[in-house]
Amino acid sequence: MIDFIYTTGWGAFIVMLMFQIPFLIVFFSIVNKKAFVDSTPGKTEASKYSSTKWAWVGLTIIAFIVVNVASIQYMPTVIEAGTGNAKEVTVEARSWAFDISDTNLRVGEPVRFSATSADTMHSFAIIHPDGQQIFTMMLMPGLETANTLVHTFTEPGEYIVRCLEYCGIAHHTMKTTLTVASN
Ligand SMILES: [Cu+2]
């Protein structure tokens, strides 16, 4: 069950609902309560008030749809679906080192990083030579399925790999490099 939540898009969606549903229950209970507290007619004309309200509801729905549609191509699960022929690289994190199956990569070649943790909570973060973080994956120990992410490097160089989850006394030494060669 925990694997399902952690490694699939639907798991992320369910977690999102788990946050949303209590919020909606509280929200609607307040709206409902307020509706019955003061039953005398308001000063705002009913028709005017209601059109403003619906405009806000409509705007929120439109913003929700636009943001989701515009950003769906950046979802890791969507990126993965389009890259069946990615190069497979396995990563095992343990206190306090990374075991990476291949650290020599190429520009323009999609790479599927499948990462696991052998002992405690770690993360697998890749940092561009200019210091900008490209991504980080949180690695929980004890999962049956590896955490995967497909990334295509666009610039050559020495990339830094670091653990960004505090994992003990030598956490700060937990780093290595990946070499990305130009074609
Ligand atoms: Cu760490």
Image: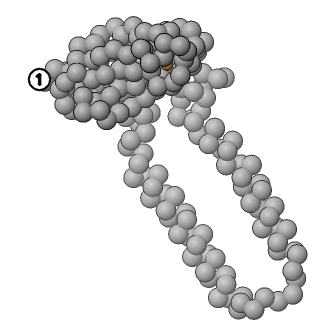
**In terms of depth relative to the viewer, which is nearer, 157 or 40?**
157
Answer above or below: position of 112 versus 34: above
Seen in the image, is 180 located left or right of residue 168?
left
Check mark 1 vs ligand 1: CB closer than 8 Å? yes or no: no
Along the viewing direction, whichever of 108 and 163 lies nearer the viewer: 163
Horizontal and vertical percent for residue 43?
75, 92
Question: For this view, does 88 lie left or right of residue 40?
Answer: left
The quadrant holding residue 102 is top left
Q: The N terminus lies in which quarter of the figure?
A: top right
Residue furthest to the left = 183
Q: Is residue 88 visible?
A: yes
Q: Residue at x 47, y 51 (%)?
A: 68
Residue at coordinates 71% horizontally, 52% vertically from top-left?
23
Total count of labels: 1
Measured as percent of width and height from the top left, residue 177 is found at 29, 16
Q: Nearer the viewer, residue 37 or 127?
A: 127
User: Does the image show residue 151?
Assistant: no
Q: Residue at x 82, y 72 (%)?
A: 34
Q: Is residue 128 above or below residue 44?
A: above
Give amino acid for label 1.
Asn
Residue 22: % across, % down:
74, 49
Above or below, 82 against 111 in this view is below
Query: Could you tell me which residue is drawn at 34 percent across and 8 percent down?
Result: 101
Q: Secondary structure at mark 1?
A: loop
Horizontal and vertical percent position of residue 20: 67, 49
Q: How is the image coloured?
A: one colour
Quadrant of the drawing holding the C terminus: top left
Residue highlighted by disc 1:
183
Mark 1, residues whose alpha carbon is within 10 Å: few (<14), some, or many (≥20)? few
